[in-house]
Structure formats: C-alpha cells, structure tokens
Amino acid sequence: MSELPTIDWWGDGIKAYPDNDMMKSGAVPNQSLVVQEHQTLINNIANLGFDIVFIPFSQQLEDAKKYDFVFTRDHFMCNKDKEVVISNMKLPQRLEETDFVKKTLSDLGYTVKTLPENAHIAEGGEFFYLPNENMLLAGCSRNNQAGAEKVAELMNVNSLHIIISEGYHLDTAISPIFNHHHDCIGLMCAEEVFDNNNYEIVKNLCKHNNWELLSQLNTDKEKSLKARAAMNCLTLPGILISTDNINDSRTIEFIHENNIEFIVSEVSQFNLSGGSVHCLTTVSYTHLTLPTILLV
C-alpha cells in the first residue's frame, strides 16, 4: 500500500488486465471508501505494534495513472537478512513501478538486488517467504520458472517450491498461517484454481512439513472470487488480517485452536482492482525481530 494519489484512484474506471479474473472492468471506486479503508488498514496494523514505512505515490506515476502502485506486495521480495530482490514485472503497464522503491529500500539499509532483465520475470505477489523455514513458495502465472529460480538464488533460501495455479498471482490461490513463533503451521488453499497435479504438490508439501491443509472448494465463480479475496491475508506471527471473514468451518476452527488473532479490515474498493490485504502490504524482516510492515 502506497500513499494514495492526489487524484481519484481509478477515477476514470478500472482497466482490467486479461489475466486477472478478480478485476472489475469499468468499475469506479467510491473515493471516500478508498481513503477510509486505506486509513483503517494502517490503523489496524499500527495498533498491533508494527513499524510502518511509507513510500510516496510519485507524481510521475500519478500523471501516468499507474494506479496499481498501491499493490506494493508486487514490487520486491525480502528475506530475513535484510536482502530484497526487486521484481521484474510481466505486464508492461507496471514495469516502471519498481523504479520508485529502490532508493527508499536502500536508504533503509536493505541490500537491494535486481534480476537480469528480459529472461527472468518475477512479481512479489507470486511468492510466499517462510522465514523460519527459509523456504520460498512461488507461482508461475506471471512469474516464469527462470525468474522464480533466480529469486530463490538471490534470497539464498533453503528450498524453492513452484506451485502453478489459475490465479494471476499465487497469493490469490493460497495463504500460509504462522504461529506466534513465526513457524508455518497451515496453508489455506482455493482448490478450484489448481489442476490435479498442482493440487497434489500442495497436499504433499503440507504432508511433508506437517502443515494443516485448509482447502476450500468453491465451484460458483462469485463465491470463489469472494473466498480468494478473503484468503489474500496479511500473514503475521499469530495474526491474520483479511478483507472479510473466512467462510470455512475447518479454517475457522484451526484459527481458534492455534490462538491466531483474526482481524477484518475491509478493502472492498481495492478488491475492485483485483487486490486485497496481502497485495496492499509488503513485509520486510530484520535479524531475529518481528517483521516491519512496509506500506510502500
């Protein structure tokens, strides 16, 4: 999440990308709600005691109407050693966004790494970094395999697991749940966006790591989109922040059993552009400390 632009966010109507089934083409967000939801999310995170760093929405991006800069999850990936890998976006409409985060990250003391151009495509929303396991989960919808593998190399992870879904980003298909020690203990999964082979990969990954597989199957398209937006949580140690309640009894039971704090912070207007709470937030790490939340 960046600071909001000074002009209306998607005030001339959302221009949907062909690969993003969660975008509502032509929708005009309610600007009062955009501001309100943005501020409420900031307040909810701040009230948990996390540090928040903002990167301004640049005038250049505003003039070019690059509204998706608010989805800062996509701009970089960060490991627990304060090393960040800058994304190389697939869509030409979003390529220049990452130019506006490098300096801020460098000024904050992060080691900034970049991908080789052209052959290596990778976007932050396609990854989940599990810090205690030093493991990387990666999608291959907007990523390509070379990009995912290079990110894993630059982040110096112990293992990379590629999971292919029909979601434009992996974070619209799965979401990890962390306990209070930041161990991954469960994986929420929208079963309908996986073919049989990749759903088996998800199941085997959970079995091998002793994670609870919290699978939901929604064959109705609108129910699926709603569930996937809710699943797109900001995942923190012992905390989930979502735009909506999770409508799955086993997932709710698991959250209660493990004393996970579940916070609803509605981002309905941002959902119109295909993103939710995870998309709007980026987490960075420092040695042996809780994450710092970067709303960039």
Image (tube, helix red, strand yellow):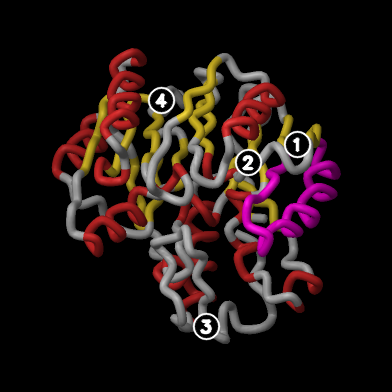
Q: Are marks 2 and 1 in contact (CB under 8 Å)?
A: yes
Tell me which label, 2 or 3, sits earlier in the chain: 3
Q: Quick check: 283 left or right of 277? A: right
Three-letter amino acid code of the residue under disc 4: Cys
Question: What's the residue at 50%, 38% (across, down)?
Answer: 140
Assess disc 1: are there few (<14), some (14-19) or many (≥20) residues with their C-alpha within 10 Å of its C-alpha: some
Assess disc 2: are there few (<14), some (14-19) or many (≥20) residues with their C-alpha within 10 Å of its C-alpha: many
Residue hosting label 3 = 13
Q: Is residue 110 visible?
A: no
Residue hosting label 4 = 184
Work out how far the residue at label 4 is from the one at label 1, CA to CA, in angstroms: 27 Å
**Which of the two residues, 272 or 284, is positioned nearer the viewer here?**
272
Q: Answer whether residue 193 is magenta in the image.
A: no
Residue hosting label 1 = 115
Depicted 144 relative to depicted 232: above or below: above
Work out how far the residue at label 4 is from the one at label 3, CA to CA, in angstroms: 39 Å
Depicted 249 relative to depicted 179: above or below: below
Three-letter amino acid code of the residue under disc 2: Ala
Assess disc 3: are there few (<14), some (14-19) or many (≥20) residues with their C-alpha within 10 Å of its C-alpha: some
Task: Name the dominant secondary structure of the magenta segment.
Answer: helix
| SS at badge 1 | loop
Work out how far the residue at label 3 is from the one at label 1, CA to CA, in angstroms: 33 Å
Of badges 4 and 1, nearer the viewer stands 1
Task: Tell me where residue 165 sits by quadrant.
Answer: top left
